[in-house]
Image: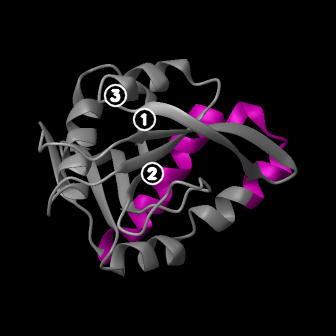
């Protein structure tokens, strides 16, 4: 049985393990081992997840199958480097499912949960970053009204990935 629930500070160890696993499954092959490990140690450390989970402006959801976390989404204020970002704009920070759970419809439900939260107090301009070569994710986000409006470099150690900045303008409630 599947369920989506808002993560709490107590979920920080679970989120750390899950975020590490899904990043490695998705992108691990792109980086030298030392660069990858350094990134994971910083970006997905338990203490960092605890800080995010405790912050009132951020939210994280876990997708669980039979009580085991198999996916997650994270959202908060927009921090992307684009000149059109305005105060109050919001960002989908992460959306990952373990490989065995992809393409079963739960990624859409997890995204919709995050989008509902991002627009909980009215329409907002929404942003996200996606790897330039992740064509499936780009098509997925396009179905939700996101279009490419810029690029930036995402550092993983010495590697700099070309990321696309996608935006969905504020509009009528969806």
Question: Which corner quadrant of the image does residue 109 belong to?
Answer: top left
On the rendered structure, is 40 left or right of 125?
right
The one of 112 and 157 positioned closer to us in this rendering: 112
Q: Which mark is residue 98?
A: 1
Q: Position of residue 118 (x, y in %)?
A: 25, 56
The question of residue 40 being in magenta is answered with: no
- How many residues crowd around disc 3 within 10 Å: few (fewer than 14), some, or many (20 or more)? some
Q: Label 2: which residue?
A: 18
Where residue 130 sits, quadrant-wise, is: top right
Q: Secondary structure at mark 3?
A: helix
CA distance for labels 1 and 2: 8 Å
Q: Position of residue 102 (x, y in %)?
A: 37, 25
Please name the colour scheme applied to the rendered image: one colour
Callout 1 touching callout 3 (CB < 8 Å):
yes
Decide: marks 1, 2 in contact (CB < 8 A)? yes
Residue 169, horizontal then vertical, whole percent: 33, 43
- At numbered mark 2, what does the secondary structure look like: helix, strand or loop? helix
Q: CA distance from mark 1 to mark 3?
A: 6 Å
Distance between mark 2 and mark 3 Cα atoms:
13 Å
The residue that appears at 64% across and 35% down in the rendered structure is 27
Q: Give the numbered dot on residue 74.
A: none
Q: Residue at x 38, y 29 (%)?
A: 141
Q: Position of residue 57 (x, y in %)?
A: 33, 74
Along the line of sight, the residue nearer the viewer: 76 or 2: 76
Q: Which residue is mark 3?
A: 101
Instruction: Please give left or right for residue 157 compared with residue 174 in the image.
Output: right
Dot 2 or dot 3: first in sequence order is 2
Segment tinted magenta in the rendering: 9-38
Q: Residue at x 46, y 26 (%)?
A: 137
- Asked whether, in this view, residue 104 is left or right of residue 86, the answer is left
């Amino acid at each position: 049985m599947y369920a989506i629930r808002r993560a709490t500070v107590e979920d920080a160890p679970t989120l750390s393990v899950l975020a590490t696993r899904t990043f490695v499954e998705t992108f691990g092959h792109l980086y030298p081992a030392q660069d990858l490990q350094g990134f994971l140690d910083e970006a997905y450390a338990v203490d960092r997840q605890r800080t995010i989970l405790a912050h009132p402006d951020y939210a994280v959801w876990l997708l669980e199958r039979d009580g085991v976390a198999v996916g997650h989404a994270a959202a908060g204020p927009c921090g992307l480097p684009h000149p059109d970002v305005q105060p109050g704009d919001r960002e989908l920070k992460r959306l990952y499912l373990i490989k065995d759970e992809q393409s079963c419809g739960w990624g859409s439900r997890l995204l919709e949960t995050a989008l509902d939260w991002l627009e909980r107090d009215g329409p907002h301009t929404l942003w996200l970053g996606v790897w330039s070569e992740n064509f499936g994710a780009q098509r997925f986000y396009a179905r939700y009204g996101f279009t490419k409006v810029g690029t930036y470099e995402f550092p993983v150690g010495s590697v700099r990935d070309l990321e696309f900045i996608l935006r969905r303008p504020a509009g009528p409630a969806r």
